[in-house]
């Protein structure tokens, strides 16, 4: 009999997630039935969405999440032992699956070195950057983009896609190291939002022709400050609002309907699964950019399943540069 380990909620998160909110338990897995596979986690993803989404779950439920796993036993003809799959198995070391909703990784793209990218640039966060920016911001060469959490998994890719499209890119991140990183990626301007004295004045200086596109990962005050500086017919892609995820109630904000009305702004929120059927198209194009060195990505790797919670909590204190992944 196989034993799996998994993280379950011990109690609902209150404020910043704490290690005592989750615990690791063991689970005995039965022998496989026909049509099933046994998969072992190789890379696990920690993502900001887990914080708000776990509100829907109760104590004892398994932490949600996606992983790259290796098929170690198979009674399903579509999957062979040794195949790698991406599955929404949660925070667990071994999983029995009937193969539904699994994507088998094409090893010509996801080579040994790039397996973890299936959770990052060539995975959900990459698709988020690609479609959330291109479809909703509809960039034109010469336009100015502002992007928040610009050194993160999504933001760092958005900024680079905007550069590929000929835009001027202004990014904000939470440390000088991150600012140096995104400048190295080709961002035109980059600022540490924790040390600037005035976000409004910084934006005015960095965007002398105003802001045409805003890709927001943060929400809160950041959003309230950027919006009035948008140009007429500006486009705003609401990707995330991480500044609000640990709050029991969202903060009260500015009343911006006048700005939205008179500037004729287009503001749209999205969940990346809207474009699920088109993700392969994004990965193909982005992989091409990676191979031509036009698109770079970084991963912050946490070693060991037992340290997975620290990787998750680190998302809310800015510990990651690029995509946060856990090596099982
Ligand atoms: N709509 C969708 O379908 C979709 C899909 C994926 C992700 N998202 C959203 O996109 C955003 C970025 O996700 P990601 O995976 O790329 O994460 P990420 O940017 O790689 O990591 C999170 C980063 O957020 C910043 N942060 C944490 N707490 C903050 C706070 N209170 N105020 C301001 N910044 C804070 C930190 O960077 P700094 O050090 O720079 O502060 C941290 O490194 C999140 O809001 C996420 O929920 C949305």
Image (spheres, helix red, strand yellow):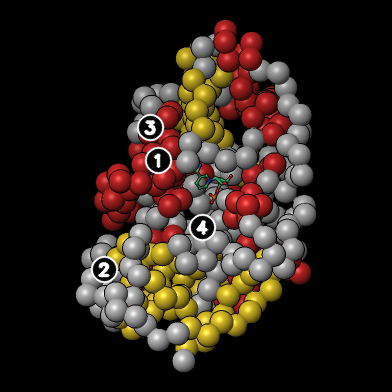
Q: Using the rendered view, name the quadrant where residue 5 is placed.
A: bottom right
In front: label 4 or label 1: 1
Q: Residue 274 carries which label?
A: 1
In front: label 1 or label 3: 1
Give the x, y percent position of residue 247: 75, 44
Q: Residue 135 carries which label?
A: 3
In front: label 4 or label 3: 3
Element carrying mark 4? strand
Q: How far apart are marks 2 and 1 (CA)?
A: 26 Å
Query: Which residue bears the numbered disc 4?
Result: 323
Residue at the image point whose x is 50% and y is 52% from the top: 153
Give the x, y percent position of residue 98: 35, 70
Tag 3: Cα neighbours inside 10 Å, few (<14), some, or many (≥20)? few
Q: How far apart are marks 1 and 3 (CA)?
A: 11 Å
Q: How far apart are marks 4 and 3 (CA)?
A: 22 Å
Q: Do the residues labelled 4 and 3 touch (CB within 8 Å)?
A: no
Relative to 98, 192 lies left or right: right
Element carrying mark 2? loop
Q: Residue 107 carries which label?
A: 2
Q: How far apart are marks 3 and 2 (CA)?
A: 28 Å
One can see residue 147 in this view: no
- Residue at the front extreme? 33
């Amino acid at each position: 009999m196989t034993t799996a380990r998994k993280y379950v909620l011990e109690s609902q998160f209150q404020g910043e997630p704490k290690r005592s909110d989750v615990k690791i338990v063991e689970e005995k897995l039965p022998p496989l039935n026909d049509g099933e596979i046994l998969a072992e986690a190789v890379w696990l993803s920690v993502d900001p969405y887990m914080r708000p989404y776990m509100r829907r779950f109760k104590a004892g439920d398994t932490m949600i999440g996606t992983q790259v796993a290796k098929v170690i036993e198979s009674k399903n003809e579509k999957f062979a032992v040794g195949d790698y799959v991406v599955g929404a198995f949660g925070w667990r070391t071994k999983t029995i699956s009937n193969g539904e909703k699994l994507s088998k990784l094409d090893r010509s793209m996801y080579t040994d070195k790039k397996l973890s990218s299936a959770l990052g640039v060539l995975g959900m966060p990459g698709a988020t950057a690609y479609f959330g920016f291109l479809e909703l911001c509809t960039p034109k060469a010469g336009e100015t983009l502002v992007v928040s959490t610009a050194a993160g998994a999504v933001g760092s890719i958005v900024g680079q896609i905007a550069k590929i499209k000929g835009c001027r890119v202004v990014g904000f991140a939470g440390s000088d190291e991150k600012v140096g990183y995104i400048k190295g990626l080709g961002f035109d301007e980059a600022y540490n939002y924790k040390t600037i004295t005035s976000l409004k004045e910084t934006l005015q200086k960095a965007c002398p022709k105003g802001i045409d596109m805003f890709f927001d990962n943060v929400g809160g005050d950041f959003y309230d400050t950027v919006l009035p500086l948008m140009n007429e017919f500006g486009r705003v892609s609401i990707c995330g609002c991480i500044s609000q995820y640990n709050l029991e109630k969202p903060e009260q904000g500015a009343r911006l309907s006048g700005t939205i009305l008179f500037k004729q702004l287009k503001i749209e929120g999205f969940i990346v699964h809207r474009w699920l059927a088109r993700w392969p198209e994004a990965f193909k194009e982005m992989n091409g950019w990676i191979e031509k060195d036009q698109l770079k990505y970084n991963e912050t790797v946490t070693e060991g399943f037992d340290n997975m919670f620290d990787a998750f909590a680190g998302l809310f204190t800015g510990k990651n540069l690029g995509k946060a992944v856990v090596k099982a």
